[in-house]
Image (tube, helix red, strand yellow):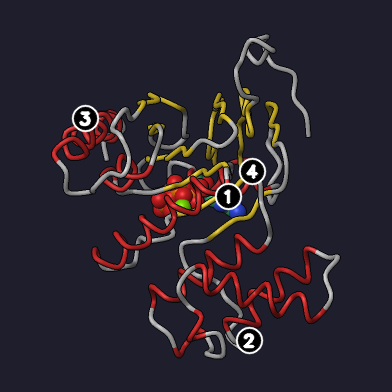
Amino acid sequence: MTATLDGSNTAAHASKAAVTLSGVTKAFGAGNRRVLAIDGIDLEVPTGSFTCIVGASGCGKSTLLSLVAGLEQPTSGALSVEGKTALMFQESALFSWLTLQGNVELAIKLRGGTSKADRAAEARAMLELVHLGDFARHRPHEVSGGMRQRAALARALAQQPEVLLMDEPFGALDAITRDLLHEELEQLWSSRGTTVLFVTHNVREAVRLGDRVVVLSSRPGRVVESIDVPIPRPRRIESSAVADLAAHVADRLREEVSRHGR
Ligand SMILES: Nc1ncnc2c1ncn2[C@@H]1O[C@H](COP(=O)(O)OP(=O)(O)OP(=O)(O)O)[C@@H](O)[C@H]1O
Ligand SMILES: [Mg+2]
C-alpha cells in the first residue's frame, strides 16, 4: 500500500516510515447505530521503532491495529504499511487442537515456500527462542498463560513480519512473568529490527518498552500527544525514571478521560 502525504515524508527523513496514517477515520455501522471509532488519526511509525499506544477502553486501539493489519478498511484517510504485518491478540488465540509446535508450523506453512522438514526445524527453533523448547509437544491448555503468550509471540515471529502489531499481549499476566516477557520482547526487537506497534492500558509498560508513547483521546480516538521516551535501555519497570514519565502519561490520559465525563 502507498499513501501520499503532505510532504512531511520526504527523502529528508533519515528512515522511511514503516506505517503511516494520514487523517484515518473509521466508523462502524450505519444510521443511528453508527459508531465513530477513530477520527482523523495522523501517525508516522519509523521503521525499526517501538511505538506504544495508550488510551481509555473503547477509544479505538484495537480498531487502529486492525486497520494496520488490513483486517478492516479505513472509512476515510490514507494508510500505508511497508512490508508484512503480524498481529498478536490479547488472548493468545492459539489453535487448541494443535500442539505449540503445530501452531508455529502452521504459521510457517501459511507463509509458504518451505518443506515439511524445514517447517518442523524452524518451528522448533522459534520455540527455543521464546524458551518453550521443552513444551513443543504440549497443547495450549497444558501450559500456563505466560507460556501461551510466548507461543503466540513465536507464531507471530514465524510469519516474519516487518511490522509486529501487539494488542495488550501481556495484560492478563502476573508482574514477574510480564517483566520477563518484556525483556525477551525487547531483545528480539533489537536483534531483528522489526517495527513494533504495541497497544496497552498500562502506562508503565508503555514507558518501559516504547521509544515513544502515543496517547489517544477517548472515543473517537485521536492522537492527543506523542511522548518520546529518552530513558536508556535496558530499562526496569520499577525504576524512578520510568515511574516519573509514566505519571506524566497517566496525567494526560486522565485529562482526556475526564474531558469526556467518564
Ligand atoms: N466490528 C465492530 N463493529 C461495530 N463496532 C465496533 C467494531 N469494532 C469496534 N467497534 C466499536 O469501536 C469502538 C472502539 O473499539 P476498540 O475495540 O477499537 O476499542 P479499544 O480501544 O481497543 O478498547 P479496549 O481497551 O477495551 O480493548 C467501540 O465503541 C466499539 O464498540
Ligand atoms: Mg482493544
Which residue is found at the position 57% from the left and 81% from the top?
100
Labelled pair 4, 3 in contact (Cβ < 8 Å): no
- Give how far apart the Cα atoms at labels 1 and 3 are: 26 Å
Between disc 4 and disc 3, the foreground one is 3
Q: Quadrant location of residue 15?
A: top right
Mark earlier in primary sequence (3, 2): 2
- Give how far apart the Cα atoms at labels 4 and 1 are: 13 Å
| Residue type at numbered disc 4 | Leu
Is 70 on the left or on the right of 218, as rendered?
A: right
Mark earlier in primary sequence (1, 3): 1
Count of numbered circles on the image: 4
Labelled pair 1, 2 in contact (Cβ < 8 Å): no
Is 65 on the left or on the right of 252, as rendered?
A: right
- Dot 2 falls on a residue whose secondary structure is loop
Q: Which residue is the site of mark 3?
A: 248
- Dot 3 falls on a residue whose secondary structure is helix
Labelled pair 4, 1 in contact (Cβ < 8 Å): no
Mark earlier in primary sequence (1, 2): 2
Q: Which residue is the site of mark 2?
A: 98
Q: Which residue is the site of mark 4?
A: 67
Is 47 on the left or on the right of 106, as rendered?
A: left
Residue 146 vs 48, above or below: the answer is: below
Q: Quadrant location of residue 126?
A: bottom right
Q: Which residue is the site of mark 1?
A: 164
- Dot 1 falls on a residue whose secondary structure is strand
Mark earlier in primary sequence (4, 3): 4
